[in-house]
Image (tube, rainbow, N blue to C red):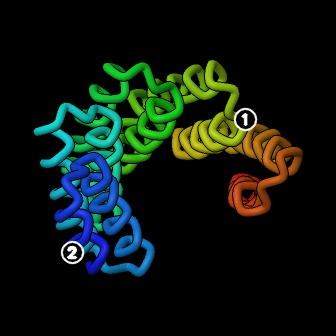
Amino acid sequence: EAALAALARTHRPELERRAHNLRGAAWFALGELRAAQDAFDRAAALAADAGDVLLLARAMYNLGAIAGLRGSPRAALSYYQLSLAAYQRAGHEIGLAETSHNVAIAYRDLGHLDVADDYERRTIAYATAAGNARLVAMARTGRAELQLRRGDAPLAATAARLAAEAFAALPDPVGEADALRLVGVARLA
């Protein structure tokens, strides 16, 4: 809060915008979703006024994440669509991949499995183009989850095992654990 007050006096609006977004990230990490939403809303408004497309995209993404955590996939989709448009305008493939993955999760939660699968495929394409193996593995885990929900447990188990191996090679033990959890659920099914 003190840093924001000091930044307001420096007449460096780009730093002030970033500080509001970082403030939101800090509140988000602490689980203070209302304060995080307020900070991201402020960052988004300042970014929109300044034409800062990347910060606007990130703020919309963060607001979508909050909506998703609150159990509002439709609201999350609204924010994510704005984020996708801004990332597309900026040509930011990592942002497009991250956001497409979360769009897939929201559609999955709404029961639109084919649309969710399309977004996971987009995630893989963007992440591959950006050279981000972690996001590719995340999307593959997401696709395995969709295969399980469609009733194809053997395919889901195999796809999740391959995703776990990709995470292990990175290494990303959290991603690997999530994929292995899905292997177990699929095998149980």
Residue at label 1? 133
Instruction: Write the residue at 43% across / 44% down.
Output: 102
- Horizontal side of 56 relative to 187 (left or right) equals left
Quick check: 27 above or below 100? below
Q: Residues within 10 Å of mark 1 (few under 14, many from 20)?
A: some
Q: Quadrant of residue 138?
A: top right
Horizontal and vertical percent for residue 142? 58, 42
Q: Quadrant of residue 121?
A: top right
SS state under label 1:
helix
The disc at residue 60 is: none
- Horizontal side of 85 relative to 167 (left or right) equals left
In depth, the one of 181 and 123 nearer the eye is 123
Residue at label 2? 34
In depth, the one of 73 and 64 nearer the eye is 64
Horizontal and vertical percent for residue 169? 88, 45
**Amino acid residing under circle 2:** Arg
Instruction: Write the residue at 53% across / 33% down.
Output: 94
Q: Residues within 10 Å of mark 2 (few under 14, many from 20)?
A: few
Horizontal and vertical percent for residue 36? 27, 69
Q: Quadrant of the C terminus?
A: bottom right
Quick check: 28 above or below 120? below
Residue furthest to the front in view is: 10
**Amino acid residing under circle 1:** Ala
Q: Quadrant of residue 156?
A: top right
| First in residue order: circle 2 vs circle 1 | 2
Q: Quadrant of the N terminus?
A: bottom left
Q: CA distance from mark 2 to mark 1?
A: 33 Å
